Amino acid sequence: MVGWSGLRKSLLVALFVAPMFLGVLIFNIYPILLNIYVSFTNYNRFHPNPDCDLWLNSIMEPRCWPMFRPRLPQGLGTPFTLQQPLYQNYSELFGRLFTSRALGDLAQIALCLIPLGLVFLLHRYWERRPGQLANRGWFWGGAFLASFALAAGLNLPRAVLDLMESGDFIAVVFRTVFFVAARVPLSFLLGLVLALILNRPSLPGRTLFRVVLFLPWAASSVAILMALVWQFFFREQGTINQLLALLGIKGPIWLNHPFSAFAIVVLVDVWFSYPFFMVVILGALQSIPQELYEAAEVDGASWWDQLLHITLPLIRPAVLPATVLTSITAFQMFGTAWAITNGGPITGVGKPGATEFVMIYAYKQIYQLQNYGRAAAFAVIIFGMLFLATLYSLRLTRITKGAYE
């Protein structure tokens, strides 16, 4: 039986912990639950107010609470209620994803990734047995060649294009994943090259170059303004086309072509993001003992061997968390694409634009179309995807390992 002193201690602990739990409940748990609830309703511009007679609305919707109910504005449309059927918003987002043709396209894409997946599993096996198979790069090269051969044989571009026509959600997510797959490796490679150059003690003016090369990261705080400058470069009468005109070349309308508009957004975002990788890698390079490189030179190792077997493995603990963080921020990118293309150019009536990534799609659903129910359903799916990706990244990078040791 718990005595009065034990009960008093428990009440004292609860008193100190209660504000934290109350804050988590109000600012974290409740918004998530409200968003999930709205995703099953027909809340939009034609149904702007809640039906407070519905008991779920009286619990979840703040405008139906007694203290706010007298101030509830009267809209022109009928009150919003639960969808019929309940999953209609999700069904509209996924479109024809679960048809036999779309599932066949998904199977073709998965088949092309099997060689890379097998080599990844082998790589995890090799990490536990570092003495086996020194020339592992051949396996990755073979896996990429096998995936490329399968992609060519199965006509992977056609399968991807067909899949992107199945629904808005698939088109937007695929386009965003392509953006992340292009932006993150390019930012890493550019940051790695510049960090290797700046790490050379014999480089004259290293401090000046570090400041100059870091400026794009500082400019990212006003990303929209800088993106408008880049947009001016690629307009029909912009700087790039004027330079081409001096050479007698008629420049294209860069931002009206889906591929070139997508490539320009990637280029601008790489320019914004490479300094982050550069600084992280530069700090990791300066922590590597110089004696390792001296011993490698004595053994006759080339610069390339030193890069592959000394530099890259030793900077990996710093680069992996930076890559995960950059991937998540790239997936949520909004300002650059919105300032340059507004999510365009348009690819078809009622279809997302060529640079309409997840955040731009959500922005249009909320502020332009005022389709709050569909936007909430979209947010629920994206939240689930990012949550699973974050859990996997924590396991992959082992960034929280020290907290449990």
Image (cartoon, rainbow, N blue to C red):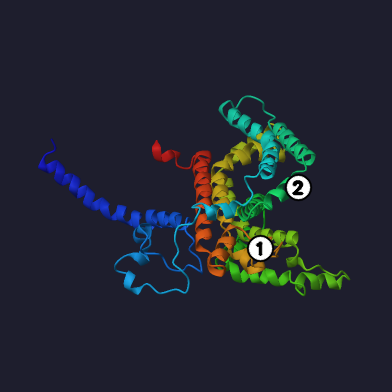
Label 2 residue SS: helix
Residue at the farthest right position: 248
* Viewer-side label of 2, 1: 1
Task: Confirm whether residue 102 shows in the render.
Answer: yes
Distance from disc 2 to disc 1, alpha carbons, whole Å, reads 21 Å
Type of amino acid at the residue the image marks with label 1: Gly
x 71%, y 59%: residue: 263
Relative image position of residue 212 (x, y in whole percent): 63, 63
Q: Is residue 257 left or right of residue 178?
A: right
Q: Residues within 10 Å of mark 1 (few under 14, many from 20)?
A: few
Quadrant into which the C terminus falls: top left
Residue at left 37%, top 72%? 72
Q: Which residue is mark 2?
A: 158
Q: Are marks 2 and 1 in contact (CB under 8 Å)?
A: no
- Say which element carries label 1: loop
Picture layout, residue 232 above or below residue 381 = below
Work out whether residue 317 or residue 296 is closer to the camera in this orientation and state it: 317
Say whether residue 228 is left or right of residue 254.
left
Above or below: residue 298 compared with residue 86: above
| Quarter holding residue 342 | bottom right
Residue 189, percent from left and from top = 67, 50
Residue where numbered disc 1 is placed: 350
Q: Is residue 240 left or right of residue 280?
A: right
Q: Amino acid at mark 2?
A: Arg
Which residue is found at the position 67% from the left and 55% from the top?
A: 203
**Picture quarter with the N terminus:** top left
